[in-house]
């Protein structure tokens, strides 16, 4: 709560008023209307209420984006955006295959977001996922490794959270084509998870991602050949997380 009484009241009020003045000036400069019932830079609502309204964006996705989180476009369930994900399921199954030669072309955000949603997205209002987990534990994580760093996929927010700023693809590149493929997904589980469950969950995730790839014209290959210790450290994974498997994704070269 805001401290508007006692010894710290003057400092707190001064800080809040500075925020409100900045907000009012920004609105006026931009030519935007002030919130209903108030004029830019002043109002009839109490100071604490005004401050809560002014600071509310800092508690939402706007602040997360400023801190390094990247919101992804909503999943394209129609398959219309970018022409991705539009093949029927039976055609996707018929086209599913492992690919080991990729172009270096980047994967657009819409396609990447759809890929991640297929692997580990939330598809129901109750927070359940596109893949099953034992007793709905939902203990998995998927990381995106690409040229601009590594990112953890937050399925509930459908956003990427930065995990590392470096290009970590060389740590995955015991097979040379991985070093230039645009994306590798790294699936992680709790170290305490039953290995059978962890493998089952990761398998469901990479199968969902693989079927999306087949539907969208992407290639993919599931791989267990990487420097696990170095990758664990570079992703800054806590000691109670472990890497289960990886999946390299990109546009097929041929």
Image (spheres, rainbow, N blue to C red):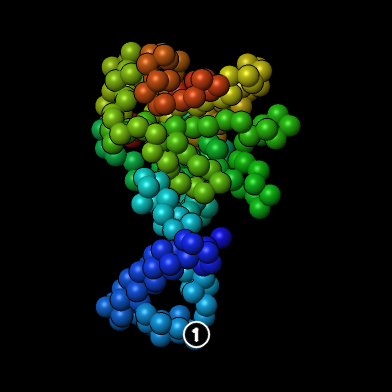
Above or below — where is 43 with respect to 100? below
How packed mark 1 is, by other alpha carbons closer than 10 Å (few <14, some 14-19, many 20 or more), is few
Q: Residue at x 38, y 38 (%)?
A: 162
Q: Is residue 203 visible?
A: no
Judging by the rendered image, the residue that carries numbered circle 1 is: 44
Q: Nearer the viewer, residue 185 or 39?
A: 39
Q: Position of residue 138 (x, y in %)?
A: 63, 34
Query: Residue 82, position in %: x, y?
Result: 38, 51
Q: Residue at x 42, y 26 (%)?
A: 236
Q: Is residue 136 left or right of residue 239?
A: right
Task: Relative to 35, say whether 146 is above or below.
Answer: above
Give residue 189's quadrant in the image.
Answer: top right
Image quadrant assignment for residue 229: top left
Picture quarter with the C terminus: top left
Residue 68 lies, in percent from the top left, at 36, 45
Q: Residue furthest front?
A: 7
Q: Secondary structure at mark 1?
A: loop
Q: Residue at x 49, y 51 (%)?
A: 75
**Res 116 seen here:** yes
| Figure check: 7 above or below 251 | below
**Total marks in image:** 1
Apparent side of residue 179 relative to residue 217 in the rendered image (left or right): left
Q: Nearer the viewer, residue 11 or 137?
A: 11
Position of the N terminus, as image quadrant, is bottom right
Give x and y (percent) for residue 11: 41, 63
Closer-to-camera residue (192/223): 192
Q: At 49% from the left edge and 32% from the top edge, which residue is drawn?
A: 142
């Amino acid at each position: 709560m805001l401290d508007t009484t006692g010894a710290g009241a003057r400092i707190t009020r001064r800080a809040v008023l500075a925020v409100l003045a900045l907000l009012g000036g920004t609105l006026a400069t931009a030519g935007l209307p002030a919130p209903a019932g108030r004029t830019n830079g002043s109002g009839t609502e109490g100071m604490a209420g005004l401050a809560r309204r002014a600071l509310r964006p800092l508690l939402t996705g706007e602040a997360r984006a400023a801190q390094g989180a990247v919101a992804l476009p909503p999943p394209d369930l129609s398959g219309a955006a970018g022409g991705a994900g539009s093949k029927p399921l039976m055609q996707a199954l018929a086209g599913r295959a492992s690919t080991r030669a990729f172009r270096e072309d980047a994967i657009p955000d819409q396609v990447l977001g759809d890929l991640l949603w297929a692997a580990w997205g939330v598809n129901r209002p109750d927070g359940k996922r596109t893949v099953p987990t034992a007793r709905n534990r939902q203990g998995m994580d998927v990381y995106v490794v690409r040229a601009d760093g590594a990112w953890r996929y937050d399925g509930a927010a459908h956003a990427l959270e930065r995990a590392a700023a470096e290009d970590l693809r060389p740590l995955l590149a015991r097979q040379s084509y991985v070093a230039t493929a645009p994306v590798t997904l790294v699936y992680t589980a709790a170290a305490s998870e039953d290995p059978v469950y962890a493998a089952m969950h990761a398998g469901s995730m990479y199968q969902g991602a693989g079927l999306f790839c087949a539907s969208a014209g992407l290639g993919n290959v599931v791989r267990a050949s990487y420097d696990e210790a170095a990758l664990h450290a570079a992703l800054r994974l806590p000691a109670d997380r472990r890497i289960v498997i990886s999946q390299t994704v990109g546009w097929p070269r041929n």
